[in-house]
Image: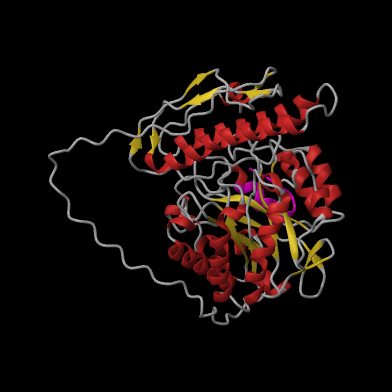
């Protein structure tokens, strides 16, 4: 999602506050342009305030901050290209509504993401995202200054006279993921979601159980497995099933940001182990290939093929695993997303021929709404495989009736799955809007659209369903360990009425 105030969000800034070396940087605002020059042409270009970093940034977050600085330039380039290709189109408000407005939303979300990345191990700065988001037109065209995309590096640490510590133990050699050994048959617990519904399939626009009856699954999404590793385990999953009456867990395996890319073997094994835990409990498990930055899933195509080949081989024959092939594609066309999906799905189907596959949609899984499009582009060119559903993400304090109207319309023609939502703003933080959340969940119930809330974590942000410190222990059941968001969803699943108290 494009994480704008009116879009499905660029990122909920899902990063764990991490400890590590700090590089000295800071943020100041300078009103200089960022547009792209088109030599010899008088087409207008876009001028935006530049972000200059001047606050402390954890060394681990340098790459994340840099990616988002680069994204600011990409957004300007795209806006300038749109100015060129749409010259003469639309009415007097076309440029504002079709180009500058969406650009403002994207920049707001990106700058917020930079703030959150910096705040993962330091006080979260206020970079004045509101003031930096708006851009103007240079009607005479010409060159505009580009965003500096290289965060300053920290000075080298001074040597100390402290006694030398013992050398760190060598990391054990990585073992190859178990791609040849399917999960042993596990007796599905009676009365569990999997025991009741069995192998799922897509029938028409609905998710259906083994009897062909349309059903709605309700559950939780983990945070990034590298950020909150102690929050997703046998105890928390048991609480979801037995205390919440939830149906599934979505395992959000980031690809970048310290995820799969950093240690493919470890993360593949981690996902396999958690799928095993869900299987023992009779929960459905969504294996989420959590791409976000970069937003083009084709960047990670080779990794996706390897990962899904390993995981599907490990869980061949399981009836409880769904596969989400691209979390939130962004900055990329539906055609490119579809091409990626149609290359990954055959890899999954080789070992899991009957599995349900979830495909992310354009504009941060907003059905294209964040990019000024909608579901019609998917209807005109759907993924050419059966048992495929299309994902939609929303954040209730930012996304309201206008988006609900589109989802209600799309649900009559497309099989939809809300694999991620929050009751907060698009940032994943801030106030919980439970009235809007209830309106959303009522709509999903009426259309039997499955949903999972972000996130099964105990962080500082209001999207965390556990209070801070909960995941250091073993007690995950009951309302005493839950935040407002957690109490609301638990109540909604158990009783049909969300109660945050």
Residue pictured at 47% horizontal, 28% vertical: 125
Does the magenta stretch mainly form a helix, a strand or a loop? helix
Q: Is residue 165 left or right of residue 141?
A: left
Give the camera-side residue of 113 and 303.
Answer: 303
Q: Is residue 487 magenta?
A: yes
Q: Residue furthest bottom?
A: 185
State the extent of the magenta-drawn residues as a range.
486-501
- Residue 242, position in %: x, y? 61, 64
Q: Position of residue 215 (x, y in %)?
A: 78, 64
Q: Tell me if residue 328 comes above or below residue 50 in the rendering.
A: below
Vertical position of residue 163 compared to residue 24: above or below: below
Front one among 394 and 190: 394
The answer, for residue 329, to whether it is visible in the render is yes
Q: How is the image coloured?
A: secondary structure
Left or right side of 246 for 20? left
Given residues 469 and 157, the one toward you in this image is: 157
Point out residue 483 in the picture as x, y percentages from the top left corner.
56, 44
Left or right, 348 with respect to 184, comes to: right
> Where's the C terminus, which quadrant?
top right
Q: Is residue 67 above or below residue 453?
A: above
Residue 187 to residue 29: above or below: below
Residue 86: horizontal and vertical position, in percent?
Answer: 78, 32
In which quadrant of the rendered view does residue 390 lie?
bottom right
| Placement of the N terminus among the 4 image quadrants | top right
Q: Is residue 451 visible?
A: no
**Number of numbered discs:** 0
- Is residue 266 inside the magenta stretch? no
Residue at the image point whose x is 64% and y is 53% from the top:
490
């Amino acid at each position: 999602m494009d994480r704008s105030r009116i879009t499905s969000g660029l990122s909920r800034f899902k990063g764990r506050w991490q400890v590590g070396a700090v590089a000295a940087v800071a943020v100041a605002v300078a009103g200089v342009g960022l547009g792209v020059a088109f030599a010899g042409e008088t087409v207008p270009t876009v001028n935006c305030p530049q972000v200059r970093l001047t606050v402390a940034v954890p060394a681990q977050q340098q790459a994340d901050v840099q990616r988002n600085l680069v994204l600011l330039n990409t957004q300007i380039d795209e806006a300038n290209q749109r100015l060129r290709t749409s010259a003469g189109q639309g009415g007097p408000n076309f440029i504002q509504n079709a180009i500058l407005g969406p650009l403002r939303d994207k920049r707001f979300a990106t700058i917020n993401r930079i703030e959150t990345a910096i705040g993962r191990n330091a006080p979260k700065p206020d970079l004045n995202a509101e003031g930096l988001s708006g851009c103007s037109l240079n009607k005479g065209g010409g060159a505009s200054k580009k965003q500096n995309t290289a965060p300053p590096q920290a000075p080298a640490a001074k040597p100390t006279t402290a006694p030398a510590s013992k050398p760190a133990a060598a990391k054990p050699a990585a073992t190859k993921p178990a791609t040849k050994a399917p999960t042993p048959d596990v007796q599905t617990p009676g009365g569990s979601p999997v025991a009741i519904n069995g192998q799922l399939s897509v029938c028409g626009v609905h998710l259906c159980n083994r009897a062909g009856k349309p059903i709605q699954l309700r559950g939780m999404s983990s945070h990034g497995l590298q950020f909150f590793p102690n929050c997703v385990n046998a105890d928390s999953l048991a609480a979801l099933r037995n205390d919440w009456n939830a149906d599934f867990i979505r395992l959000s395996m980031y690809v970048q940001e310290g995820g799969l890319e950093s240690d493919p073997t470890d993360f593949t094994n981690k996902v396999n182990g958690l799928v095993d835990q869900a299987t023992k409990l009779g929960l459905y498990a969504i294996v989420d290939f959590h791409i976000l930055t970069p937003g083009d899933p084709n960047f990670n195509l080779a990794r996706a093929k390897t990962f899904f080949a390993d995981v599907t081989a490990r869980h061949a024959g399981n009836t409880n695993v769904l596969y989400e092939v691209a979390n939130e594609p962004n900055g990329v066309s539906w055609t490119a997303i579809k091409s990626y999906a149609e290359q990954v799905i055959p890899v999954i189907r080789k070992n899991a021929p009957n599995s349900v596959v979830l495909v992310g949609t354009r504009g941060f899984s907003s059905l294209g709404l964040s990019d000024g499009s909608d579901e019609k582009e998917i209807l005109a060119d759907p993924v050419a495989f059966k048992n495929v559903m299309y994902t939609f993400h929303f954040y209730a304090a930012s996304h309201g009736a206008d988006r609900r109207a589109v989802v209600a319309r799309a649900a009559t023609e497309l099989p939809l799955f809300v694999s991620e939502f929050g009751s907060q703003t698009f940032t994943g933080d801030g106030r919980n809007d439970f009235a809007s959340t209830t309106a959303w969940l009522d709509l999903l119930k009426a259309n039997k659209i499955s949903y999972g809330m972000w996130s099964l974590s105990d962080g500082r942000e209001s999207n965390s369903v556990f209070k801070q410190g909960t995941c250091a222990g073993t007690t995950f059941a009951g309302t005493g360990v839950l935040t407002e968001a957690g109490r609301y969803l638990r109540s909604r699943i158990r009783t049909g009425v969300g109660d945050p108290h």
